Image (cartoon, rainbow, N blue to C red):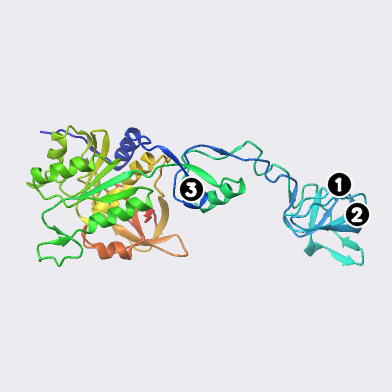
Amino acid sequence: MLVVPTLTFEQARACILEQVTCGTTAETVSIDDAPARVLAQDLAADRDYPPLPRSARDGFAVRAADLPGRLRVIGEAPAGVHFAGTVGPGEAVEIMTGAQMPAGADAVVMVEHTSVEGEEVIIDRSAAAGDNFTEAGAEAAAGEVVLTRGSRIGATEVALLATIGATTVPVYGRPRTAILATGDELVAIDAFPDPWQIRNSNAHALAAQVARAGGCPQILPVARDTVEAATPLIERGLESDLLLLSGGVSAGKYDIIERVLDRLGAEFFFDRVLIQPGQPLVFGRARGTFFFGLPGNPASTMVTFELFARAALEVLGGQVGPTLPITLARLTHEFRQRPGLTRFPPARLGADRPEVTPVRWSGSGDVPALCRANAFLVTDPERDYWPAGELIRVLPKR
């Protein structure tokens, strides 16, 4: 009989992050194919940014020592044009946002604080050296690392890649993730189920979650509830970088997944976590591939993927330090629970204010309630009651 530890929510997360390491090799993609990928090496600035002092405002480039005063305008400095002159005592240059600061000037006065009479600008206030412009190299120095290996690439990272001229980007490969749903009750989603059957929604939901987390999902045929049927499909799944199993991991007569994995030489790190939904959760490694046995109820499957399997997938794909985006929000209604477990009931975060409302749901099979929710509460297992208006931890849906 297998003896596998039961862990708390925090212990299970720590165990996964301790065991899993990057499991994919690097490849090069175009900058337009880089979003959502993970950077495979540090990238450095190819020159100083900005390369020359740059105005941060529309206005006049001046010598701060000349203010307040009436200054002679000796020229104009638009963005993208080199200004060759020098600002001397009692002189100013009209300048646009993003333009190169003229030599001799050490401040920019915003146009709103000036008035022009003929060829002179009148400025009735003082300024300090350094006002309203950015020094050369203030954003990044030539050779400075600006994007670090293990960073997931989003829109802001793409902007920086384009800024430094990175038309191609070294990234880690997407982890190949096999998805295997189990159960005699499952039918294809295009079938009309008998009353005792259900459509295989878990496999398709997991595929969507895997793709959003940076993996490459592959849905395997349903494994029926026998050792003979499940074994070859699990062996096939273990040929991928990560195997996600749904169902068959509880303590029932037909929950045979752990038995099959044990026969295949699996090492089990835990097979139960003190959470709800999702207590019967298995994590281990067999034939060099990490696997998760996720509970079969839809809410349990989706929640445990986000809490645990997603972190493993992100690390396999090269991401450094994956974290859960847990935040705090005030309850609009009181909330009660039985203590002992960290619970993740569905909830609705307010659009404008940091408020959260628990969503009415009927348990781990209630998919419509999950669609009404945009977050999950994250409860303290030691507490049984939160009054309305109190702060509570919240995990937004991703």
Labels 2 and 1: the sequence-earlier one:
2
Labels 3 and 1: the sequence-earlier one:
1
Q: Which sits in the foreground, 359 or 62?
A: 62
Q: Position of residue 343 (x, y in %)?
A: 28, 51
- The secondary element bearing badge 3 is classed as loop
Of the residues shown, which amino acid type is indicated by label 2? Glu
Of the residues shown, which amino acid type is indicated by label 3? Ile
Question: Above or below — where is 353 with respect to 305?
Answer: below
Whether label 2 touches label 3, CB < 8 Å: no
Residue 313 left/right relative to 170: left
At label 2, counting other C-alpha atoms closer than 10 Å, the crowd grade (few under 14, some 14-19, many 20 or more) is: many
Q: Which sits in the foreground, 130 or 164?
A: 164
Q: Quadrant of the C terminus?
A: bottom left
Labels 2 and 3: the sequence-earlier one:
2
Say which residue label 1 marks: 104
Whether label 2 touches label 1, CB < 8 Å: yes
Q: Position of residue 223 (x, y in %)?
A: 15, 49
Which residue extends farthest left? 253
Q: Which sits in the foreground, 304 or 186?
A: 186
- Which label was assigned to residue 153? 3
Say which residue label 2 marks: 91
Q: Quadrant of residue 321?
A: top left
What residue sits 74% from the left and 55% below the top?
A: 80
